[in-house]
Image (tube, rainbow, N blue to C red):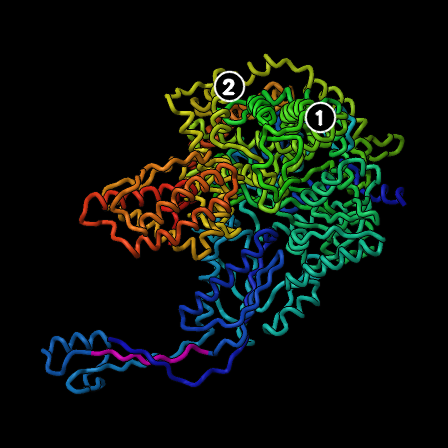
Amino acid sequence: MADAAEKESLSFQDMILTLHAYWAARGCAILQPYDMRVGAGTFHPATTLRSLGPEPWNVAYVQPSRRPTDGRYGENPNRLQHYYQYQVILKPSPADLQDQYLGSLAAIGIDPLLHDIRFVEDDWESPTLGAWGLGWEVWCDGMEVTQFTYFQQMGGYDCKPVAGELTYGLERLAMYIQNVDNVYDLRFSDAVGDVAAVSYGDVFLENERQFSKWNFEVADTDALFAGFKAAEAECQRAIAANVPLAAYDQAIEASHLFNLLQARGVISVQERANYMGRVRDLAKGSCKAWIDSQSERWTEKYPGWTL
Amino acid sequence: MSDRFVSGAANKGADFLLELRSEEIPARMQAGARAELEKLFRAQLSAAGLEAGDLTIWSTPRRLALVARGLPEATAAVSEELKGPRSSAPPQALEGFLRKTGLTQDQLEDRDGVYFAVIDKPGRATAEVLAEAIPAIVRGFSWPKSMRWGKDSASSESLRWVRPLSGIVAIFGEELIQCEVSGISAGYATRGHRFHCPGEITIGSAADYAEKLRACHVIVDHEERQSIIRDGAAKAAADAGLALVADEGLAIENAGLTEWPVPLLGRFDEAFLEVPPEVIQLTARVNQKYFVVNGADGKLANGFVCTANIDAVDGGAEIVAGNRKVLAARLSDARFFWEKDQKRTLAQHAEKLANITFHEKLGTVADKVERVAKLARWLVEENIVTVQPRHSREGENPASTPSSGTPAFAGVAKEELADQAELAARLAKADLVTEMVGEFPELQGLMGGYYARAEGLPDAVADAIRDHYKPVGQGDDVPTAPVTVAVALADKLDTIIGFYYWGEMPTGSKDPYALRRAAIGILRTVLDNSIRLRLQPAFHGGFQLVHEAMRKLPPRDVELGFMGNAAAGAVLLVIDRLKVQQREAGVRHDLIDAVFALGGEDDLVRLLARVKALQAFMATEDGTNLLAGYKRAANILKQADIAVAPAKAGAAGNSAPNTTAPAFAGATDVDRTLLAALDAAEPAATTAVAEERFTDAMAALASLRAPIDAFFDGVMVNDPDDAIRTYRLGLLGRFTGAVHGVADFSKIEG
């Protein structure tokens, strides 16, 4: 029985390919991951910056996400310091967004008359991005598999129009679909001919061991503090030079260095709020600079649109 | 000027159905939304002159529904009569009136030389009223949080709703109410269950609404869903030989998350039961919204009940398996925290408290702990908290167990109690830095208690760590074990002292540091345990402790007398709470004032005993008459410009007559009887107060009643003879002084 289920279910990579095909068929541009270390798919400028302004924007992409404090040295079956999010942004949010989303679950093999799918209130807020939205965490048999959010504000600015954001937790979904209890047992790819299948553990177990150790024990905190300061300064320079995309990169960098410092346990409770405020200022400053650089074009193209 | 009367026969009524369909409404907001819908609907109809009558309001995660029964077909016709100018008035007045009413002169009635206009306003069709009311209700709806969505949200003015609004059904009788809000037109069509019946269904009228939905796997009545969950969960547990731990909040929440609730029982690995049951229950309830179950032994068993929203094709086996897996992951996290936390002792955890700010001006939690430890030890060393819990001697005269009467063998026990209180205080906050409390803040205290026991600390210490936050709410238990009492009191005293030290007192509705709750905690603990604690010196000592500790923190300039004033303020905070608390017990706040006003009475146990004796006395005829006599005496003294007897009689009761009334030749029998009564009553009352025999003190006062009544009846104070007047004023001065020895009667109402 388990064998049958295994054979039927999608491998990790096939699940991604299926989602790509599904959202591409609904008009999404399939983007690639952003090439920086981020804590979530929301940090990708294709979400943060592009959710601002009046232009329609429909994209989907996978984003590797790093959460240093979640590392467990590869010993916990559910927790990883590096994992993948599947991110969909649809702006403006279409009227049938929930149905489109449920269609994607069906596409990857979740039958809603066999499994209990629920929309449970979860208001999303990212203090570091100055952003918030209303929506749900989507439960599948009690497990949160997706964050579903209608963005209301980003970088402290109203989203006009509102974008719908879907963030799938890929490992959790795959564990569900493949019916495995340990993330490292996931089939990453299936065997093809003589080529053996690859497991998630084959790809990432050693990474989790080494990065957990580095995040928690090894990383040079002086260098991290210095890096934070440097990124902060560079972000401000880039804002002044009116290159907001470059500025935003530095905001992302500062945010990740702050997360690493947290994992190293060198930021006291008192300092924490201060650092978060600094990251927020960088992100908000970048968003503002982005709006400033684009708003003339926006108002020209969309008469009547106001910030 | 105008007069309205209603005409027309009663309409035949019809039922109205309104359904507002949206994406999933948060469970916690549904009850408020039902109330809001009812309020707005009634207001709209009433503004149009219609009575909404009987309303039924239902909610599911995806819809709010309202059924109004027997609405008339139209609003009643109204005939309005307007009085105009006199027929003899200048023509301009008449022209103005005709313009205003839109009538011609021959349509006016001339009644005794005055023009009247009678304007008939026909009734409006109810359908028309409803068509206007629905958009107004939707636009005026108030949600705790609302949002914009879709392409309309490019404009700031777009409709806001809790989640995207997707459809409106509005049927009056069988007639569709034509209306539109933000591009959504009302229709006959709704949708059934999201997965079981995703297509459109057509509603005919209010009469078939609920049944058509039921046929499409939607139980629209939230109360029915709640009972399905309540009963179904209990049955699922009972079928497995288990007992559901009832949780009404969970039943309501799950009803708010489902349109077709199906409770399902699952099991988790028995090995997780080594984690404290409170942790398991909290994880299951807060994170997963599951019920937990007890075994036959009444202890938590390895089962849970989840509530699905579908009749699964496999009977729910996959759903249970999935939920079991999620719960297992949660519980293994909890077990990970449970095990990891125990790798360090509480003392080791406590070291990290130096990194947590308690309040920027009051230092870290470690600083607070240091102060609480000292206060806890002080409470024991001062015999305020003693080895024997006082409450076991309830009913005895408190004076019969003076603190100096501690048995000799208690010396060792007292030292041990002081050590345990200090130790427990030092460890009481350590669990704040544990992983488990980081994950579940509501387990503070409880986890500390578990960890303390696990590392082999004495039960008394573990209990004190567990219970030192108590009493938290109104119904919460009050600590009784001596170590716990010492830590619980010290913690709350320190909190009040710390904030008062910086002038952060509660004002009006603002009490950001919950100081009133701390004050209630103190007074309940003190009264329930009959603890003899003088508040003023306790607070004063505490302020010195804080001041001492502040040397390494931002210093505060403290002027002379600051400590005393701050302590007095803190005492008042507790007394204010005492009045509020005792009001419910039927104790009069003015009597508390009357005793507290004497000054120095800051021992809550004695204060309350005295107040209760006073209240009993005031309920007697002697009491009310004595009060009348007192007020009369005080008035006469006031008119004579003599200060009403000051409350020299302090808490210790060392009262002395402030005005002497020597034997006087002009005295009458009435005067002499009062003087004799005072000579007897004054020392009797004083002694009784000192010995805390308050009923006896009242009896002594009662003995003054007849003589003072006779005095006022039989003699005149303001005698023309100055010597007699002075003598009698002296008598009244002694009388008020004697009364003051027991309570400040000027504070008593009535």
Residue B607 in sight in this render: yes
Residue B277 screen position, x and y as percent: 75, 40
Name the residue at 15% across, 77% down.
B95
Q: Is residue B563 magenta?
A: no
- B714 to the left or right of A136: left
Q: Quadrant of residue A79?
A: top right
Residue B434 screen position, x and y as percent: 67, 28
Kindly indicate whether the residue at mark 2 contacts the one at mark 1 (C-beta within 8 angstroms).
Answer: no
Residue B130 sits above or below residue B290 on the image:
below
| Label 1 neighbour load within 10 Å: few <14, some 14-19, many 20+ | many
Name the residue at 50% across, 45% down.
B696
Residue B332 screen position, x and y as percent: 77, 34
Indicate which disc residue A71 carries: 1
- A79 to the left or right of A149: right
Mark 2 residue element: helix
- B272 to the left or right of A26: right
Q: Is residue B82 magenta?
A: yes
Q: Chain of mark 1?
A: A
Q: Amino acid type of disc 1? A: Gly
Magenta stretch, overall SS: strand
Indicate which disc residue B190 carries: none
Residue occupied by mark 2? B549
Q: Nearer the viewer, residue B266 or B599?
A: B599
Q: Chain of mark 2?
A: B
Residue span colored magenta:
B74-83
Q: Amino acid type of disc 2? A: Ala
Residue B427 in sight in this render: no
Q: Nearer the viewer, residue B252 or B504?
A: B504
Mark 1 residue element: loop
Name the residue at 44% across, 25% down.
A242
